[in-house]
Image (spheres, coloured by chain):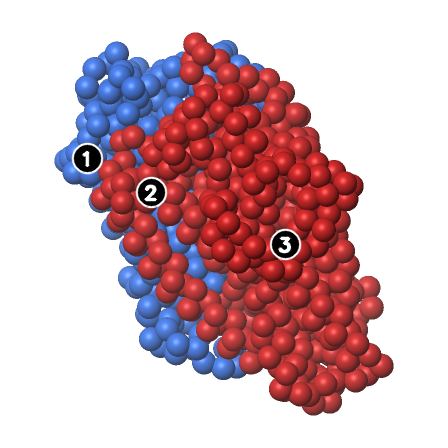
Amino acid sequence: MELTTVWFALIAVLWIGYFTLEGFDFGVGMLLPILARDDRERRVMINTIGPVWDGNEVWLLVAGGATFAAFPEWYATLFSGFYLPLLLILLALIVRGVAFEYRAKGIEDQWRTRWDAAIVIGSFLPSLLWGVAFANILHGVPIDAHKEYTGGFFNLLNPYALLGGVTIVLLFLTHGAIYIALKTDGPIRERARELGLKVGLGAAVAAVLFLLWTQILTGNLGSAVFYVLAAAALVAGLAALLRAREGWAFIGTFACIALAVAGLFVALFPDVMPSSTSSLFDLTTSNASSTHYTLTVMTIVAVIMTPIVLAYQSWTYWVFRKRISVHHIPEERLEAPVG
Amino acid sequence: MDPLDLARWQFGIITVYHFLFVPITIGLSAIVAGYETAWVRTRNPVWLRLTKFFGKLFLINFALGVVTGIVQEFQFGMNWSDYSRFVGDIFGAPLAVEGLLAFFLESTFLGLWIFGWDRLSPRLHATCIWLVHLGTLFSAYFILAANSWMQHPVGYSYNPKTGRAELHDFFAVLLNKVQLATFPHVVMSAYLTAAAFVLGVSLWSMQRNEGAVKEIFRRAVRTGAALLLVAGVGVAITGDISGKIMTEVQPMKMAAAEGLYDTQTKAPFSILEWGSLNGEHHTSIIEVPGLLSFLGTGSFNGEIKGVNQLRAEYQAKYGADPGQKYYSPGNYTPMIPVTYWSFRFMIGLGLLAAAIAIAILFVTRRGRAPNSRWWTRAAIALPLLPVAANSFGWIFTEIGRQPWAVFGVMTTAQGVSPSVSAFDVWTSMILLTLLYAVLAVIEVKLLLTTIKAGLPEDAPPADDSDDLDRPLAFAY
């Protein structure tokens, strides 16, 4: 296999890692005001993702860095072209990242309410906008002969892309609700399971519509197989949730997101960013890539490092495997109020 | 302002802001790891309380360092897409390796450290924070390798067919001589910065407490001061090496650091200067003869090239005009007032911090604990000095390279994103700057609240038992 193909696949893997992992912590963030009845329950929710959300976010950073290194033209066109949506994502990720740490440092209601809002917005906006961005990549955007994006911000807000955004939000909400059901105990677990089923149905409808539309737009046989498997995984996951098998349900949504993202990349290949102006201007794995030498160096690093990273990230999940409920949340607070 | 001006300002603002937090993160992770290791070895609760106290301050700082770092990674693509296309083959690799090797390590093991107090054995728990520190060092190494390549491009060649710089030798990039001097210099200043932070906070807390707590903080004052001095020596040595390598690979930067217009042997170093810095006239107020020659070459008689001769040299080598918009044609001179003063502030503020540390070591000797208001003021000023010195150091090294983005290869003006409008950059600059300003206020407030709250109670962590209903040792 060509190294450019290897790196296309590796970048797909990094995005799959990002969407499956940060997907549930985004879901938990968005569900904060919906699932929790009081501050103690909100803290239960935050603590289920507390030890892992930052590590989940690094998948995005590595996907970005790897795109820069392996496909610099893709990196340059994508992030200068999608400038304002990306800016919104960055702003959202900034306030969200600070919110988890800083929320806990104050005891005043207003202080916490504000950081809770930051967590909700910071989880919702990136979910929506990554969906919009990926849909636009698949759909094709105006790119000229110099590989420059020539559209504007509102080009990106077409119905197909918005459906992509909504689909991702609903999938992440389902994924997050199931994660809460899996990681907590008590009334919140029951509520999470019920909500997961309801939102899950919505996610299933949106996902089927979006994937069908995508298949008609850009699909091939390979992508169709992935989409069908993704839909099946979601249905199986929801069925497991109905029978209170939360572990299987989580595997279901996890697999659904992984398979759907994989299908999108299969549909995209060998393009990395098709041009809607002319197919002559498409960015492809070959015309957007680095040199063979750089790809070789990067492959060596990735082959050595990826298993190590996967091993210690998995270990983290093992260390924090116990369910949390309200009586695990210590009552004592920081000595002095802030706010 | 056009998109290029704006992009330059934005890069400066968000990069300097990010780097306010980075050195403290690097240095404080080591100090906290040191305290925890002392606790694991001695089981003396003093060290555990210091671990937890400075651990909290570390996390408040770390949060902002991380989130502002995310912007750094994407701004090359957003604002500098032509730069990214031109150098992606070389510059992207260290960035990707940084993510794989450093960011995963830092974030994963920090999560384990924060929440793992009752899930991991003390030894394993302390290992986690050491791994976080190792992650910060990896991170510094790879990002500085990328920057050092911009200062002194090696291991690549220009391919006219693809119109870009292409990597030939990754190890040349990782072992660039600029990098080998820069990395220890930056790490040493990070230790110095964090030591000044610990020293300032502890000195202030020592004065507000009595008895056992006062004694604990006195101990932290002593460890902070000692580390500051050791790191200070390291900063000076590595800075000296950096200066000599810089004179070799970027002579214009050294000439601009002094405002030395004509080539000179026994070149003096002026402490203060008066007058215009455009070469028309300038008067040195205090001058140390031969010092610039020594800084640049290691010999008081060494020759330092002047701005005028270098400009002629660069014109012959690179043509008349690499960046017409910002520099009159053929003018390869960076903004001399900025390089002149930032160079002096970098060195001066660092030396001042070291001088205060010596004074503090003196007044806290043999169990003494000074209570005068002047020491309170010193305690407040102390952490700020190296933070400012770090910023001036970066301003010096980046402005001093102008008009180049990649020295001798690509100008900054050539790197800007052609498809990004002034509106886009205005929007992002205003929003990011406002958000950063708000977060800075909140961060300072939180740091002060946490410092005022003082040492946590003397309670050793519970062991790893299987009592399912026991509250978590740590929860958000």
Which residue has dot 3 on it? B270
Left or right position of A284 against B45: left
Left or right position of B302 against B151: right
Task: Name which quarter of the figure residue B380 lies in.
Answer: bottom right
Q: Colour of chain A?
A: blue
- Identify residue type, mark 1: Gly
Q: Which mark is residue A200?
A: none
Q: Is residue B159 above or below residue A98?
A: above
Across and down, in percent, residue B280 comes to 48, 46
Q: Helix, strand or loop at disc 2?
A: helix
Q: Subunit of mark 3?
A: B
Mark whose residue sits in front, 2 or 3: 3
Q: Is residue B192 above or below residue B294?
A: below
Task: Name which quarter of the figure residue A186 lies in.
Answer: bottom left
Quarter of the picture holding the N terminus of chain B: top left
Q: Subunit of mark 1?
A: A
Across and down, in percent, residue A246 comes to 42, 49
Which residue has dot 1 on it? A152
Give the residue displayed 22% in from the left and 32% down from the top: A210
- Identify residue type, mark 2: Asp
Circles 3 and 1 in contact, beta carbons < 8 Å: no
- Label 2 CA crowd tier, 10 Å (few <14, some 14–19, many 20+): some
Which residue has dot 2 on it? B5
